[in-house]
Each structure stands twice: as C-alpha cells, then as structure tokens.
Amino acid sequence: MLSIIVPVYKAENYLRRCVESLLRQTVNELEVILVDDGSPDASGAICEEYAAAYPERVRCLHIDNGGQGRARNHGLAIAEGEYIGFVDSDDWVEPDMYEKLLAAAENAGADLAVCGIRTVHENGETASLPVGQPEKPLAAAGSVCNKLFRRELIGELRFPEGLWYEDFAFSAMLLMRAKKTVFVQQDLYDYRVGQVSTMNNENARKNLDILEIMELLREFTEREGKREDYEYLLINHVLLDGIKRLSLLSGAEKREALWLLRAYVHEHIPKLSDCAAWKQETRNRRMIMMLNYLGLEELSKLILKIKKAI
C-alpha cells in the first residue's frame, strides 16, 4: 500500500482538485491522509466530506495549527503504507504518477523514486524543473512532493517543526541515507505557481531558518561521514540559492540577513577555492558562488538578470 500525506491549510479553492487527482491514481491500494492544520477556512469541512465519501481510501486528521512539517509528522504517525508520498494541498498530480514511481522503485530495488515537476502559472504557462540524475542524487534535495519514499528508509526520521525549509532537510537526509535512488524523467507533479511559499516571500528573518536546517544537516553528515555532501548542500542552498533569494528582497532586515548567511558559509568553508564540492560545479555556478562568497551579490544578481534577458 501507498500512503499519500497532504497537509492542508487555507486551501479551500484548490483542495478538491488536489484530492481528486489522488483518487484518480491508476495504482491500486493507495490511502490519502488529509491533515487539516487548523485551517480557518472551509478546508477542514472539505477534508471531512472526502473522508465520508471514500471511507476506505481517505483518512482525515484535525490538529491545531503548527506548520507544514508538524502536519506531515502527524500524517506519518498513522500512515500504513509500505511507501510514503507527500502532496501540497494547492497542487495536483498526474493520474499515473504513483504507478510510475512505484514501478521504478520496485524494478530498480530503490529506496526512493523521484519524478519531474511541472510549474503551472495562473495564465496557463508551464515549465519543467530539473529532475536530477543518478550520479548526483543530492541535486534533487528540496521538495518532498515529487518523491516516493520506502517506509523503511524513513524509519524514525521526522520533519523539523516550526522551521522553513523542513522539506529540504527531510529530503536531503533521505537522499543521503538511500542506498539507491531512481529517477523518472517525466513531469508527473503539478506545482501551482502563485501561492505564498518559502521560495516566494518577503520575510528576510524567516529565511534565516535555513541556517538551523544546515546545522541539522551538518550533525547528520558528521554522523554519517558525509562531509563533502554537507559542503555541497551548503554552497548550493545557502551560498547560491539563499543569498540569491535574499538579494531580491527589499525589506529593512535584508542586509543583516545576507551578512549572517555569508558569515555562516565562511565559518564552515574558510576558503571557497579549496572546497571540493565547489570545484565540481560548472564554471558559471562557481563564478556566482564566488561573487556571493565575497559579498558581491548585487553583481551576481545583475549577471543572472542579463543572462536571463539574453
């Protein structure tokens, strides 16, 4: 059986499309766990509606609001499936997503299967996000929603609670823990662009949650003897993505937050040119990382803007 966990908060306009896409899955033996995270709108009532209409397939939990990570952990506590998936309540999935992920995992004897993500804008415009490659599985760290995890792989691991980037931490740890990860090179998960999210916000202070997440990952990689993996995650998710994201903000706390991100990278990578993970990046990515490392993120932002315009 597969268990698909859906944390639900303020999703009344999108939840039905999400749940219907799960009920239409072509794979047999799938349970949908809807976790109403204290939503103040009609989302909780919609969850109950589906649980009543499909008692053999849909389960519903109502909890006090505590964030997405905590809601997913509540779902994990009652999940019965041999494989576990996660879907956000304002997104949807293709009808054969879980059939294809399950087949890929079982045929390859993999602990974890990953598919592509299609971004969908309100005007109908779509784009594909990179899936990742077997030779570089940590490049797939980020969202948990385009993945199917073997329950044994997860074990007692749970999402960090009360922090942003909790899905990044969870997926990164499991990608490092997995003996084998398989990639399905198809866009099977549909991500609705436009919602307020960790990647789309103006809160400079909360962006610093990435540093707490990186400390969790540092401790994990030290226990697992995976220092180079930690440095790979640090330069990609803090030095590159984190500083880029903060540099685009306009709030008063932006400058201090940028300084704190850079100081953290300097503490753990005193000389970027000696970092093995940095040396393995493409020339363009190395250049942007070095500019950010040196405090020249405005220049790197300009270069990226020009590149995008070209």
Image (cartoon, helix red, strand yellow):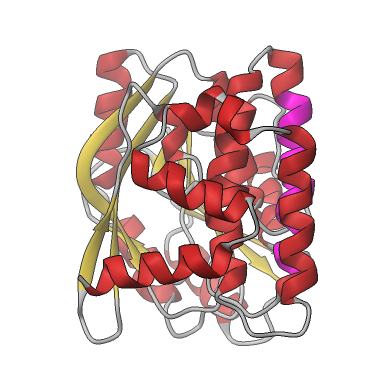
Is residue 214 covered in magenta?
A: yes
The answer to whether any part of residue 124 appears in the image is yes
Residue 93 figure quarter: bottom left
Q: Please state which of residues 53 and 256 is positioned toward the viewer in this rendering.
A: 256
Quarter of the image for the C terminus: give it.
Answer: bottom left
Q: Please state which of residues 70 and 298 is positioned toward the viewer in this rendering.
A: 298
Residue 23 rendering spot, x and y as whole percentages: 33, 57
Residue 112 rendering spot, x and y as whole percentages: 42, 27
Quarter of the image for the N terminus: give it.
Answer: top left
Q: Is residue 193 left or right of residue 74?
A: left
Residue drawn at 57 percent across, 20 percent down: 177
How many marks are shown on the rendered structure?
0
Residue 120 rendering spot, x and y as whole percentages: 28, 72
Residue 169 rendering spot, x and y as whole percentages: 64, 41
Magenta span covers which residues?
206-220
Is residue 275 covered in magenta?
A: no
